[in-house]
Amino acid sequence: MDPSRNWAQDVLRCRLCETPGPPMYCDICHIHLCKACVGEHLSDLSKEHKVLPFEKRGSTPKCSKHSRKLCELYCEQCGIPICATCLSSKEHRGHIFIEIVNNIDSKKELIQKDLQELENSIYLKYQEIASINQVQKSALNENSQKLTTEIDKHGEDLHREINTIIRNMKSNMEETDTKHLAVLDKQEDEIKHTISKITQTITELKTLLDSNDVSRVSAYKSRNDEFRRLPPKLTVSLSSFTPQKINKERLYQQFGSLSASSIKTEEHGYTMESPGAESSPPDRPLIDVPRIITQINTEYGEFNPLHSVSCLSDEEVWTCGGDNMMRLYNLRGELVKSVQTKSGNPPLDIAVTRSGDLVYTDYGDRTVNIVKNTQIQTVIRLQGWRPLRVCSTSSGDLLVVMESEDRKQSKVVCYSGSTKKQSIQYDDKGRPLYSSSGLYNYKYISENRNLDICVSDYNARAVVVVNQAGKLRFTYTGPPSTTKESFKPHGITTDSKGRILTVDGDNDRIHILDQDGQFLRYIDNCHLQDPWGLCVDTRDNLFVAEYWTGKVKKIQYYM
């Protein structure tokens, strides 16, 4: 067989005239065409055609909503390709569109730039930071071991002092008892001796009564005067022990304290400028008038209220409410997936881990569970406590807000898998950081980018923020104001700039704070009705779950 003929057969040819190396391609019919045959191909009106340069083939996908239509435009707000029918729909009204081919070209330029930057710069920087982290982890471990030894030693010293006090108190008690017993024993011996005399005298008197010996009877002298002098009555006043109430606050102060450990995030040291770009602004300003980008109508509503929302991606959000189902919706309001809880109880809260797994709290059976694909695993089972809200941290740990069975105590516990790493309940003076639950147990939680732990405490009417070590940083109870409007926070989240966003449910608005608790502004113009749960996507778009309407509103609040 002629090798050259084999090679010729492998060359791409025009489907109509077999001219080699055709530069055009029909994305609908999936055939190669030379320029001369394009007109002939388009003249076939029995079906739609889309002829493009060969290198741009595949750039015109079919519409996911209208299967017979091609997507020739790209919606910048929604970030999806759309067809002409979608263009005229209410869903995309007022949005900005560009030609999808232009979008592909610009995206590929961006991809090429990103690839070069990742390979030649960012990847190397991450390796450097990872190396530094290893050194710091080693130092952290050594310091922890040192502090543990010092704390144990101080604890042993304190135990030794307490044991000394106990020994001295017991010794004093035994010494006093010995003295008292000696007095009682002496009197007891004297009484026994006297009783012996009385017994002997009684015997002698009975003998005399029966005797006719005149001389013995005449010689009798009474000893009753001697016996009438009774011994003194001894009454022992018993000792008692009155324990002092243990003052936890003083005990904390007397034992000592740990200086706060924290991680300083130096933004400018870790942020790299884009190649060829001028220095980027340090912050994204808040817009004057926040606006609703998308509204998702869910299955929740008046008889099944919606109380939590968590972003799986920029396109999909998990939700949970009053029933035992957790539902995943896309931005078009389509139900993508639903998962029933393992116990059949309603989930109290949900979160999404860094790896994309769904986590939920089950108040009824005291568990925290993780959904991996279709399998539900119980990772935390509590005793004496019940889980309320949960969030996933940047390090992959779980932060769980919980309350005691009697609802009188609340705390935050950090878990790595099923292992408890840290418990946060009291401030430096031994006072509770969080309110007791009482009638309502609304305490949502979020980790900020500086690793602060933010809890919205409904009963305390406050947002309580502690640092990574659990030390109180600040408490926010609302902006400085002369009005008497009550602040009762529900959902809470944080964005990429460290801003804290929390729901002010009674006033149908969102408070935005900086990471140090300073009030920045409200979101109160988006027709919010009973807002409850919050989350943000990677672009800092805010998702608000409305309790009674069952709607999830996607809101833009930044430039």
Image: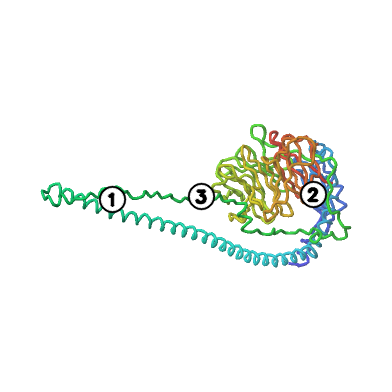
Q: CA distance from mark 2 to mark 1?
A: 135 Å
Q: Could you tell whether 197 is left or right of 519 in the image?
A: left
- Image disc number at residue 226: 1
Above or below residue 101? Residue 487 is: above
Where in the figure is residue 370, as x and y percent of width and height?
61, 49
- Image disc number at residue 326: none
Label 1 sits on a secondary structure element that is helix
Q: Could you tell whether 350 is left or right of 558 in the image?
A: left
Question: Dot 2, how many residues are within 10 Å of its Cα: few (below 14), some (14-19), or many (20+)?
Answer: many
Closest to the camera, between mark 3 and mark 2, is 3
Q: Do callouts 3 and 2 mark residues in contact (Cβ within 8 Å)? A: no
Looking at the image, which is closer to me, 24 or 436? 436
Color theme of the render:
rainbow
> Quick one: label 3 or label 2, which is nearer the N terminus?
2
Three-letter amino acid code of the residue under disc 2: Asp
Label 2 sits on a secondary structure element that is loop
> Quick one: label 2 or label 1, which is nearer the N terminus?
2
Tell me if residue 28 can be seen. no
Closest to the camera, between mark 3 and mark 1, is 1
Where in the figure is residue 316, as x and y percent of width and height?
71, 45
- Image disc number at residue 27: 2
Q: Could you tell whether 25 is left or right of 150 in the image?
A: right
**For the N terminus, which image quadrant?**
bottom right
Label 3 sits on a secondary structure element that is loop
Looking at the image, which is closer to me, 136 or 287? 136
Above or below residue 121? Residue 481 is: above
- Image disc number at residue 242: 3
